[in-house]
Image: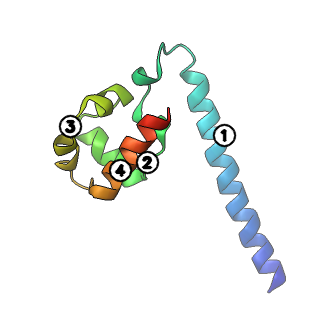
């Protein structure tokens, strides 16, 4: 059993490293961006399904999220009160 747990741990760790490498690559690609507001919404790390829903609704930059009303964001499928609070908090933390 211990060997199985160890393999699971290594698999999880591998996924974390893979995610971090993707994030580093994403940040390197943003080096020419003038302000955080021009950055894609992926920079604020929302739940994947919320991020996808926002992008489908046309919210692709932090600036667009910042300027959107709470009502407009709540009208996006998958954005509930908790997601809205997470979006606002993440933007304020930038």
Q: Residue at x 49, y 16 (%)?
A: 33
Relative placement, left or right, of 14 versus 73 is right
**How would you rate the neighbour count of disc 1 (Cα within 10 Å): few for under 14, some for 14-19, many for 20 or more?**
few
Determine the residue positioned at 42% across, 53% down.
47
Which quarter of the image is occupied by the N terminus?
bottom right
Callout 3 secondary element: loop
Whether residue 31 appears in this view of the structure is yes
Which residue is at 40% across, 21% downward?
38
- Quote the CA–CA distance across marks 3 and 1: 33 Å
Q: Say which quarter of the image contains residue 9.
A: bottom right
Q: CA distance from mark 1 to mark 4?
A: 28 Å
Counting residues from the N terminus, which is met first, the one under dot 2 or under dot 3?
A: 2
What's the mark number on residue 21? Answer: 1
**Residue 85: which numbered mark, if any?**
4
**Pointer 3 residue:** 69
Q: Earlier in the sequence, mark 1 or mark 4?
A: 1
Q: Which residue is mark 2?
A: 46
Q: Is residue 1 above or below residue 18?
A: below
Q: Nearer the viewer, residue 89 or 11?
A: 89
Q: Residues at badges 1 and 4 in contact (C-beta under 8 Å)?
A: no
Gap between marks 4 and 3 measured at Cα: 12 Å
């Amino acid at each position: 059993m211990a060997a199985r747990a160890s393999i699971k741990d290594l698999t999880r760790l591998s996924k974390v490293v893979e995610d971090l490498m993707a994030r580093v690559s994403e940040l390197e690609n943003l080096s020419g961006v003038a302000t955080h507001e021009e950055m894609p919404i992926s920079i604020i790390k929302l739940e994947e399904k919320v991020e996808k829903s926002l992008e489908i609704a046309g919210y692709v930059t932090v600036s667009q999220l910042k300027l959107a009303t709470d009502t407009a964001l709540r009208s996006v499928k998958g954005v509930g009160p908790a997601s809205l609070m997470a979006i606002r908090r993440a933007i304020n933390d930038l």
